[in-house]
Image (spheres, helix red, strand yellow):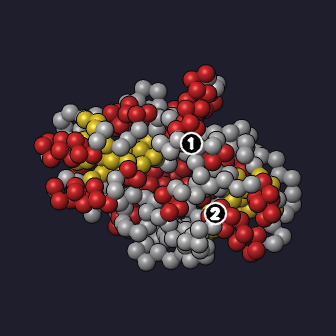
Amino acid sequence: MADQSRDWMQRPAIIYGVGFWNRKSIRGMLAHLPGKLRFCRSFERALLKARQANASLFAWTTRLSDDQRAACEKAGVPIVNVEDGFIRSVGLGAAFVPAASLIMDASGIYYDPSRPSDLEIMLEHDDVSAGERARGEAFRKTLVELGISKYNLGQRHDQAPRSTERQVILIPGQVSDDASILKSRSDSLDLQSGENPNLLLLKWVREHNPDAFIIFKPHPDVTSGLRKGGLSDEEMLTFADKIERQVDIIALIRQCDILHTISSLSGFEALLRGKQVVVHGLPFYAGWGIGLDLTASPRRNRKRTLDELVFLAMIKYPQYVNPESFAACEAEETACALSGLRNHKVESLKDIIMLHLARLAFRLGF
């Protein structure tokens, strides 16, 4: 069932709405497709070229309106939704750092539980062989050993200092207008109330865990001034005991006993490291019997092991390139390359300029 949704691998590709910083990545990932890869700035031109070439239209998921999706369906042009992968880069996509992994999904997209995605279909229907399960286990151990996360930011420590004997709960912040929040649903939080979802989660966790030591880590895109969702220190410290902006998320996961999240990828990263994860939304890793899921998921009925989830979600589902050569590769090579880049990363003048440009673009509404 999932394999049928990947017939885009046999068609030419027309690309629309993907940022200029990801073009090298896209070229590497799709180099094996037939025909010439074309990037189009306008939707109308992209649709025309896709019809002429009998091609798939690859589009950044949030850049296509409902009307544009309907126009593709009417024209018989299949859509492939593009989104950042789960181990993305050393640095932020919002700061124009190219992605070493991208999702290409012809059914939906992994963060939108309102409709099935290729990943959900795989998790519900695909059988995983013993060899594939072993590969998932080995990859999980590699990620844990190397300390790899989505953006690989912050100060790295083998173990973040733990200053309390109380139960430690980690809450990773999310971008309040991110599609993973806007598209999510929750049986424990009123995400439709208009209140900042980070504040909703902080309130819930404190109310249900009055004696815990709560650490809140704001999302790096918010901390960098590139996305919405910020809270004042006063708001955060009303419910949290500590705000942690600088320490790497992986070090904080190692330090905590429990992680609470709506739909953050940090929840998945905590599962990889054997932590208890309480999930208030419906991210891709919820509903399979692995974490403590507080939101019902009627389409997700199959029980999965963690290593099956890792194989399907991190090895089979995304596309990868080497972050230095931008040549297509397997997940394992990308993880090792990102580790090497992060360990030798020195902030350059270019990095500083690109971050300032990204902040300016955000403020201007681009």
Q: Residue furthest front?
A: 364
Rendering coords of residue 46 (x, y %) = 24, 43
- Position of 179 with respect to 160 (left or right) is left
**N-term mark: 1 or 2:** 2
Q: Residue at x 76, y 45 (%)?
A: 159
Q: Quadrant of residue 203?
A: bottom right
Q: Which residue is mark 1?
A: 363
Q: Quadrant of residue 176?
A: bottom right
Q: Residue at x 76, y 59 (%)?
A: 236
CA distance separating discs 1 and 2: 19 Å
Rendering coords of residue 93 (x, y %) = 51, 40
Up-down relation of residue 295 to residue 354 (above or below): below
- Position of 44 with respect to 234 (left or right) is left
Q: If the image is split into quadrants, where does the N terminus sit?
A: bottom left
Q: Secondary structure at mark 1?
A: helix
- Position of 247 with respect to 77 (left or right) is right
- Position of 239 with respect to 259 (left or right) is right
Along the viewing direction, whichever of 79 and 154 lies nearer the viewer: 79
Q: Secondary structure at mark 2?
A: loop
Q: Residue at x 50, y 77 (%)?
A: 296
Question: Could one spot residue 305 in this view of the protein?
Answer: no
Closer to viewer: mark 1 or mark 2: 1
- Which residue type carries mark 2? Asn
Question: Could one spot residue 252 in this view of the protein?
Answer: yes
Q: Which residue is mark 2?
A: 196
Residue 271: mark in rendering: none
Q: Residue furthest top?
A: 349
Up-down relation of residue 262 to residue 55 (above or below): below
